[in-house]
Amino acid sequence: MEGIETLNNLKPLSMKYLLIVSILFLLSCSKKTDTTAIESCNQEPKTYSSSNGTELYLTQQQWYLNRIGNGGSVNLRVSGSITGDSATIRSYGDGLISDVVLDLDSDKKFEKDLTISFNATSLTMGDIVGSTVILVYRNSDTLKAELEGCVLRF
């Protein structure tokens, strides 16, 4: 009988030990991720030039993220001026590529806020770096300015 009493006294101790070990195991298996969101950033003003004299002056490039349902988008608020006749900016989304006309005022200045890329069904996890192209047309010359945003994170 004495052996059974000793065994019964060990059961609560064993259960506590098992519970503590299980909790420690679960905590050690949890994935640590960097959840620091970087939802917008600004790039420095920049000038692009072609060998034929066509120029693009960017005075503002603000890249930012936007959640849309289960998906999201990378957006760009851009302003500047050109020496050309017209300009377009490229956007991408769920496999579609389109060129959006930049409306120019009489001084050939523009300001545009647009979605550069989006995914309607899921967010990209981790770091996101948006990019786009601005095309400036002047007579037969075309200036291609490749813009790259900074690191963003949902």
Image: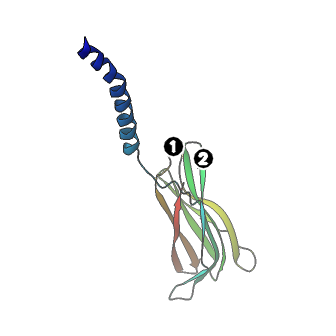
Mark 1 or mark 2: name the one nearer the start of the chain.
2
Image quarter of the C terminus: bottom right
Callout 2 amino acid: Ile
Label 1–label 2 contact, CB within 8 A: no
Residue at figure coordinates x 41%, y 42% from the top left: 27
Residue at figure coordinates x 38%, y 29% from the top left: 16
Q: Tag 1, which secondary structure?
A: loop
Measured along the vertical axis of the image, is residue 127 above or below residue 29?
Answer: below
Image quarter of the N terminus: top left
Image quadrant where residue 137 sits:
bottom right
Color encoding of the figure: rainbow
Measured along the vertical axis of the image, is residue 133 above or below residue 106?
Answer: above
Measured along the vertical axis of the image, is residue 2 above or below residue 33?
Answer: above
Image quadrant where residue 59 sits:
bottom right
Callout 1 amino acid: Thr
- Residue designated by label 2: 68
Q: For marks 1 and 2, give the CA distance.
A: 9 Å
Residue at figure coordinates x 30%, y 15% from the top left: 5
User: Where does the image place residue 98, in percent across and percent down from the top left?
Assistant: 54, 59
- Residue designated by label 1: 121
Relative depth, front residue between 106 and 69: 69
